[in-house]
Image (spheres, rainbow, N blue to C red):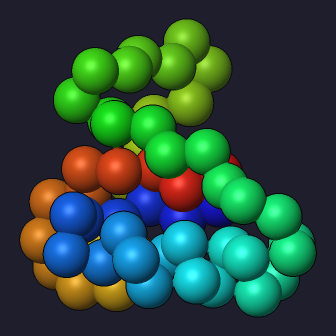
Amino acid sequence: MYVVCKEHVELAIDKFVDEYEDAPDIVDLKETEFSDWDPPAKCAECDKNAEVLVV
């Protein structure tokens, strides 16, 4: 699972495919709420706001 900004979505997809050998689901964090989990506020690759969950 990767939480990234829009700039790093392709990198996160590549990492996911390399690790799991399957296509990930892409979730827009602005349109989705989680009842038991708060996503990180910052991108895993830089200091920009996290916008996308690759899972």
Instruction: From this view, report whether residue 12 is shown above or below residue 50.
Output: below
* Drawn side of residue 4 relative to residue 6, left or right: right
> In this image, 12 relative to 40: left or right?
right
Classify 41 as above or below 35: below
* Residue 35 against residue 2 in the figure, above or below: above
**Residue 45 image point, x, y percent:** 34, 85
Q: Going by the image, does 18 lie left or right of 30?
A: right
For image coordinates 58% across by 83% down, the residue present is 14
Q: Nearer the viewer, residue 45 or 11?
A: 11
Pinpoint residue 13: horizontal percent, then vertical percent.
54, 72
Task: Identify which residue is drawn at 22% across, 29% down.
Answer: 30
Residue 37's quadrant in the figure? top right
Snapshot quadrant of residue 24: bottom right
The N terminus sits in image quarter = bottom right
Task: Name the residue rendered at 19%, 75% in the picture.
Answer: 7
Q: How many marks?
A: 0
- Residue at figure coordinates x 87%, y 75% from the top left: 21
As drawn, which residue projects farthest toward the right?
21
Is residue 31 in view?
yes
